[in-house]
Every structure is written in structure tokens, then in C-alpha cells.
Image (tube, helix red, strand yellow):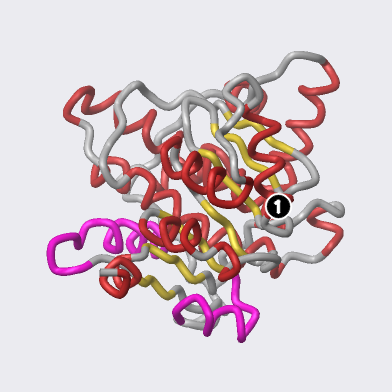
Amino acid sequence: MAARLEARAAVAVAAVVALLSAAFALYGPPRDSVVRRAFSLRTAHSVKQMEDALQLVRNIVPALTGGKHKGQAGRIGIVGGCQEYTGAPYFAAISALKVGILEASKAKDIPVVIDADGLWLVAQRPAVILGYQKAVLTPNHMEFSRLHQAVLSGPVDSTDPRGSVLRLSRALGNVTVVLKGEHDLISDGQQVLECSLEGSSRRCGGQGDLLSGSLGVMAYWALLAETEKTDGSRPLLLAALGACLLTRQCNRQAFQKHGRSTTTSDMIAEVGAAFRELFEA
């Protein structure tokens, strides 16, 4: 049973291929309004802080040039799925296209994004990821509760979600944790970013896989970027923020067109336009 669950683990191993452009451009509000939709902001200082963070995400996006050839920018490896569940690795892989197993990845110092049953494995054996700071975990509410109980030996403090994410990251040795929810909470054990870019009330099966795939790409870009582009910020924190923003923007644009019938495939079709809106406008 454990072997089967490990085989299904949706672990996106980041290296990188460039995001493909969509066939059409969808023009939206100017950047400052994107910033104000993107975060939970309470003070002028917070506004400035989040504007700075979004600009750092834009800084890590490499320019497209005619001088590069296929494969030169790296490769993405997707581990996941089984005979009954093929959607998750497909959505993760196609998202990576548009924007080793764990131990082998650690041995080669390769960044990894761990989702779904991969998180079940971490909850059973936290040591497998402990202290590996090139790992990003992307749990939903239930997965986060299971991880919290396993690592911190206690339930999540529902009155302090930001503190809970921060403590779990620290307990895992400053592994980046992305708690998906109404607002995404991202922590590297040193700080917490809260992303609340407007998406929609429609939650599609596979939406988290879009996030995992795009995060694999963003992680590579962030680690590749020069220090001055990240201004001293932890690269994977910026990568996670970028992936959360992109996933939410895709959801919003797809819902505007398809409403209740929106699927993750509809969201995938929005990747190019959403990317331009957020990072290249």
C-alpha cells in the first residue's frame, strides 16, 4: 500500500522549460490594481511591502530570446499518478510546460515541489524532507492539519493560521510551506506572505496541480536569478508567491468566461494571458 501511495505522489521536480504564450491576449487592470487585489493589506507599509514582493517576482522571470534552443533552459520531471489517477501529473506537467524521486533529487540538490499523496508520505516520515530547504510543500487545509499533527504533535491553532504555517516551516527546518485556501499563506520559517488575489468561488479538481507545475518552473527561475534581482529574499518564497498569483489569475479569467462550468483545462488555457497580466504587462 505504501509503495502504491509513493508511486502516486505528485512530486514536481523543478528544472525549467519556458512558459508558452497563449493564442490571444486578455488585457486587464493596470499593475497597481493587480497589487491591491493580490494581497491582504492593512497598512501603507504593507502596501509598499507587497508591491516590492511582486516586483521581485517579476524580476526572476527570464526574458524570452531567439538565441535559446529547446532544453537549454532545463527540464521538468513529474512523478505522480497511477492507473486510476492520471489527471494530477498531466495538469502539473502541462502547467510546467506553459510556465528523480525525492531522495535522488536531494542527492543532486534539485528543488522539489511536493503535493497530494507526496504530503501523506512526508506526514508519515517527516525526516525525508527535514532541513531540505529546496523543498516546497503545498498542502490544502486537511493535508496541512495532518502535517501539523505529525510534525508538531498537536492540532492547528485555528485562531492563528499565519503562526501555524510559520511554526510548521520552522519545525521542518525552514522548508517553504504554501497553505492553500481562501487566502494562500506562504512561509519559509522566517516570514509569512498572504496572497489573496481575487480568483473565483469555483474550485476545480486539478487546480492545485496547476499550482505545483507552475511552481516548479518559478522555483528554477528564482534559484537561477542573480541576488540583486531577489534583493536578498528567499528564492522559493518568491517562487511560491508567483505560482499562487498565477493560479488565482487563471481561475479568475476562466470563471469570467465559463462560470460554474469552469474546469482546470479552462484554467490552463488562460496561463499565457494570466502570466502577461501579472508579470509582463
User: 107 or 3: nearer the eye?
Assistant: 3
- Please say if 65 is above or below 258: below
Bounds of the magenta segment: 82-111
Tag 1 secondary structure: helix
Q: Position of residue 106 (x, y in %)?
A: 60, 79
Which quadrant is home to the C terminus? top right
- Please say if 25 is above or below 134: above
Picture mark count: 1
Where, by quadrant of the figure, is residue 37 drawn? top right
99 within the magenta span: yes
Q: Position of residue 234 (x, y in %)?
A: 77, 55
Where, by quadrant of the figure, is residue 174 drawn? bottom right
- Principal SS element in the magenta part? helix
Identify the residue position indicated by label 1 in the image: 171
Which quadrant is home to the N terminus? bottom left
Q: Residue at x 65, y 80 (%)?
A: 109
